[in-house]
Amino acid sequence: MARTRPPETVRGSPCEGGAPLAAVRWALTRGPLCPPGLDHLRRLGLVYFLYLFLFSGLEYTLSFLAHQRFQFSSLQQGKMFFFIGLTMATIQGAYARRIGPGREVAAVKRAILLLVPAFLLIGWGHTLPVLGLGLLLYSFAAAVVVPCLSSVVAGYGSPGQKGTVMGTLRSLGALARAVGPMAAASVYWLVGAPACFTVCSVLFLLPFLLLRTLPPLGGTLKAE
């Protein structure tokens, strides 16, 4: 009886072994990218990661805050998230989709700045109107930032690189959503809601400043 050998395992490239680090460095993007384009991608990827890290963490702690401070039941929390989702869908349809090419970064900067008062209101407010105002600002930012950043990043790379570029961006987002809730929940239970939401609100200035110091994108996109 003839012996059959199993097929050899295809060895991955060195950068594939450290997937998170490779994603941060955009090392999986095959083919040449001009240095300005690669630098822009790394900056935009860092903004995307920091935003989702902070946002997903505070989003995760919303249920804790609503139950502790307002004694929301499961049904009331469901209504709260329904309000958030409905507001996001309305803003995406009425505003976000109408943002013209080249204006996405400015829209993202405005939306990120809105998150500072939004989470301060949520973290410190003790009445339902204040909570509702904070959630309204929160929903506006949530409806704008990710679609606009994705649209900007999609303009980089050759047609053969588009899938890898967008896949790397999605990987950064998944990594942020995996570690953000754990970090935010730890801070929440250690120091309390006001301190947790205040610290994270201030940290939203980091992605804002990274975008503010980003060189103009037009020339780079044309070069790509």
Image (spheres, grey):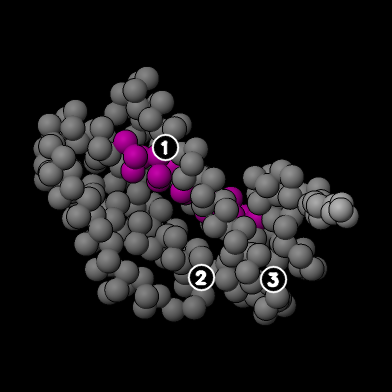
- Mark 1, residue position: 181
Under circle 1, the secondary element is helix
Q: Select label 2 or label 1 by which is in front.
A: 1
In the rendered structure, which amino acid carries the disc numbered 1?
Pro
Q: How many angstroms separate mark 2 from mark 3 (CA)?
A: 15 Å
Q: How many angstroms separate mark 3 from mark 1 (CA)?
A: 31 Å
Q: Is residue 92 left or right of residue 174?
A: left
Under circle 3, the secondary element is loop
Which circle's residue, 3 or 1, is located before the other in the chain? 3
Question: Which residues, given as a range, are shown in magenta?
Answer: 42-61
- Mark 2, residue position: 151
Residue 217 visible at all: no
For image coordinates 65% across by 55% down, the residue present is 42
178 relative to 150, above or below: above
Residue 65 among magenta residues? no
- Mark 3, residue position: 161
For image coordinates 12% across by 44% down, the residue present is 75
Q: Residues within 10 Å of mark 2 (few under 14, many from 20)?
A: some
Q: How many angstroms separate mark 2 from mark 1 (CA)?
A: 25 Å
Farthest front residue in view: 1
Which circle's residue, 2 or 3, is located before the other in the chain? 2
Q: Which mark is residue 33?
A: none
In the rendered structure, which amino acid carries the disc numbered 3?
Gln
In the rendered structure, which amino acid carries the disc numbered 2?
Ser
44 relative to 122, above or below: below
Q: Where residue 9 sits in the image (x, y, percent)?
A: 80, 51
